[in-house]
């Protein structure tokens, strides 16, 4: 490949006009032989940061990635723009491996993707030693962090690359980056001397919404019907069972939904993932086993039916929405049951006290995000060390500011009920019984325990059942109450006394009656704001793309991204030269698809 100037490569190969954010500086630094540690949110554009230096420098850019299931797609996407790319991993046959190795040794590969475990094999290291390595890119670098949820022992060996190839630049990249993870990556990969690039973690095109959980599947269905008809998206559930049930429920409602969890046979998982990547408009219902490295650009929504265990997890999962920069939704349904369930999971978890305390801190941060009455984005960014952001105007609390109310008396009623049960009866109960006592409901369980004789029985008729549940949820989130034991019973905490004595006021969040909905009025988000004529052309281009993708057996976005098709639809180019100006249309794709696109445009409505 001839071009050697980064900006020229960006334009000719990838078809983009300009670098984004820190890309230009990173590309220049690494192309010049410097080491880099790059922290950039999902969708920020990390790939170009090592792809372009690989093309600019002599030799082959070696990319270490744990995501072997996705290497084929990554390589296909590069070949589609004319980059000579290959991979070595356990999924390929001996002949294919030999061909890739030979191409590398002959200097005929611009990029080589490697699974980290390959480096354990001496022959791989040997092979790299006999060719020319332009750079090492370490993708998903947080996998080196032992405390993180994605730890891969093989990543620990990557610090040795530096000893063996001291002159070859290394670039480590991740989208997961609290301060602690950042420091750990730098240390373990021996990158303390590298230049660190920390991008803003904001994802302005994602609208964050956290709603009170009532009938979660029904609420999800309403969201999909009202705002995401025909869109691709991911629905996260905590358990395999709930994944299966939710996928069945959506399917029964006429939505193309597929399940994904670790309990499914590997071929089924692979087939479902492939369909999600290749076909338009599929909803993947999954546990968190799904998603790392999924770089499908047009995921329009990520929905959580259960509370994520940490803000890191939540941000990484929601970050899979809207990589293409178009408006997308991150939606979470959350309720009292989630808090109870997660506290129980922490109680039951293996590991020492320090480990459980850590899990607890993660949960507390997540709960604080759920219960905040301020901008969700400000809260998220502060968590990732970006303090002082302005209210975003594109999250539920900005769009429909929640009211707060003085919940001190309500809190006292709950706490004193818990206290009396303990003191007068030596009993403890779960949230359901406490609510029944407060509202004075005569149930068999009330009669059985003679709870109608308690002085607090019926003292809380000013609130409805659901409202008492939100009060209890918020008391749990603030650790004014705690839940535990085999029956998930409530008990007081060290701080409860302050409220009971009247030394502490409790401001509570009033859940909106009708949860916020996007202010934008849209049907399928992919056609946001396109005038009718352009929308028709866009759909025509999408149909053409679908057919081409199917014929080649590659994901549709490998041909062109939605954003590129939208630009073609609005700009209506009439010549190859004009078409070549569109973002995302590089030389290879122009040569390959240019005529077909112009014909599709000229054909007019079907
Ligand atoms: P990340 O790996 O950080 O999640 P990607 O490298 O997949 O992000 O890039 C996200 C999207 O942005 C991709 O669709 C990519 O083609 C696009 N992109 C990246 N850099 C640019 C740029 N300079 N101009 C236009 N589009 C870009
Ligand atoms: Zn906001």
Image (cartoon, rainbow, N blue to C red):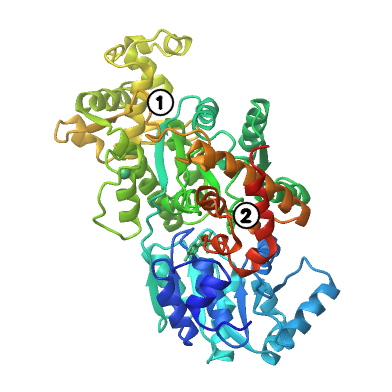
Looking at the picture, how far across and down is residue 570, in whole percent?
50, 48
In the depicted structure, whether residue 338 falls above or below residue 463: below
Q: Which residue is mark 1?
A: 431
Q: Residue at x 68, y 58 (%)?
A: 595
Looking at the picture, how far across and down is residue 197, in whole percent?
39, 72
Depth check: give the residue in front, 17 or 505: 17
Q: Residue at x 61, y 84 (%)?
A: 2
Name which quarter of the figure residue 239 lies in: top right
For mark 2, give the secondary structure.
helix
Depth check: give the residue in front, 249 or 437: 249
Name which quarter of the figure residue 418 lies in: top left
Quarter placement of the N terminus: bottom right
- Residue sitting at the far left: 503
Circle 2/circle 1 CB separation < 8 Å: no
Quarter placement of the C terminus: top right
Q: Disc number at residue 557?
A: 2
In the depicted structure, whether residue 403 falls above or below residue 583: above
Looking at the picture, how far across and down is residue 164, in whole percent?
59, 90
Depth check: give the residue in front, 328 or 246: 328
Precedes in sequence: disc 2 or disc 1: 1
Looking at the picture, how far across and down is residue 375, in whole percent?
29, 43
Task: Judge depth for marks 2 and 1 and give the one in front.
Answer: 2
Q: Residue at x 47, y 9 (%)?
A: 444
For mark 1, give the secondary structure.
helix
In the depicted structure, whether residue 425 falls above or below residue 120: above
Report whether the residue tagged 2 is closer than 8 Å to ligand 1.
yes
Q: Disc number at residue 581?
A: none
């Amino acid at each position: 490949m001839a071009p050697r100037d980064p900006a020229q490569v960006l334009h000719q190969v990838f078809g983009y006009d300009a670098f984004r954010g820190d890309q230009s500086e990173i590309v220049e630094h690494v192309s010049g032989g410097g080491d880099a540690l790059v922290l950039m949110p999902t969708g920020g554009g990390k790939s170009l940061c090592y792809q372009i230096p690989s093309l600019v420098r002599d030799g082959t850019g070696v990319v270490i990635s744990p995501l072997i299931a996705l290497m084929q797609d990554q390589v296909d996407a590069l070949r589609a723009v004319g980059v000579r790319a290959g991979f070595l991993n356990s999924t390929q046959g001996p002949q294919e491996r030999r061909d890739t190795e030979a191409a590398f040794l002959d200097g005929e590969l611009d990029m080589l993707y490697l699974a980290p475990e390959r480096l354990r094999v001496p022959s791989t290291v040997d092979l790299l030693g006999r060719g020319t390595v332009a750079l090492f890119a370490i993708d998903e670098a947080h996998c080196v962090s032992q405390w993180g949820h994605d730890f891969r022992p093989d990543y620990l060996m990557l610090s040795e690359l530096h000893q063996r190839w001291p002159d070859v630049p290394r670039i480590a990249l991740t989208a997961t980056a609290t301060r602690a993870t950042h420091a750990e990556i730098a240390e373990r990969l021996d990158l303390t001397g590298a230049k660190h690039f920390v991008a803003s973690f904001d994802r302005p095109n994602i609208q964050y919404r956290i709603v009170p959980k009532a009938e979660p599947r029904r609420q999800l269905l309403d969201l999909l019907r009202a705002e995401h008809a025909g869109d691709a998206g991911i629905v996260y559930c905590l358990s395999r069972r709930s994944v299966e049930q939710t996928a069945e429920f959506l399917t029964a409602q006429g939505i193309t939904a597929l399940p994904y969890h670790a309990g499914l046979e590997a071929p089924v998982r692979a087939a479902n993932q492939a369909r999600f990547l290749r076909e338009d408009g599929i909803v993947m219902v999954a546990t968190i086993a799904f998603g790392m490295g999924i770089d499908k650009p047009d995921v329009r929504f990520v929905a959580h039916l259960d509370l994520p265990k940490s803000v890191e997890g939540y941000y990484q999962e929601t970050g899979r929405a809207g990589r293409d920069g178009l408006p997308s939704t991150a939606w979470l349904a959350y309720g009292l049951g989630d808090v109870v369930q997660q506290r129980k999971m922490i109680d039951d978890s293996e590991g020492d006290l320090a480990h459980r305390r850590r899990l607890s801190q993660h949960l507390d941060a997540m709960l604080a995000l759920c219960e905040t009455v301020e901008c969700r984005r400000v809260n998220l960014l502060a968590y990732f060390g970006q303090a002082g952001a302005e209210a975003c105007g594109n999250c539920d609390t900005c769009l429909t500011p929640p009211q707060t109310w003085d919940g001190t008396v309500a809190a006292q009623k709950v706490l004193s009920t818990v206290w009396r049960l303990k003191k007068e009866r030596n009993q403890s109960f779960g949230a359901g019984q406490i609510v029944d006592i407060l509202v004075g409901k005569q149930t068999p369980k009330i009669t059985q325990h003679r709870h109608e004789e308690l002085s607090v029985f019926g003292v809380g008729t000013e609130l409805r059942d659901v409202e008492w549940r939100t009060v209890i949820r918020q008391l749990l989130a603030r650790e004014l109450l705690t839940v535990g034991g085999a029956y998930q019973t409530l008990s007081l905490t060290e701080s409860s006394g302050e409220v009971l004595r009247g030394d502490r006021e409790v401001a509570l969040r009033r859940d909106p009656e009708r949860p916020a909905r996007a202010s934008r009025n849209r049907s399928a988000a992919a056609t946001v704001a396109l005038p009718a004529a352009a929308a028709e052309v866009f759909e025509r281009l999408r149909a053409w793309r679908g057919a081409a993708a199917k014929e080649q057996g590659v994901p549709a976005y490998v041909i062109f991204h939605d954003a590129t098709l939208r630009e073609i639809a609005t700009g209506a180019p009439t010549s190859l030269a004009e078409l070549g100006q569109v973002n995302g249309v590089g030389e290879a794709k122009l040569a390959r698809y240019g005529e077909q696109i112009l014909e599709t445009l000229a054909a007019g409505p079907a």
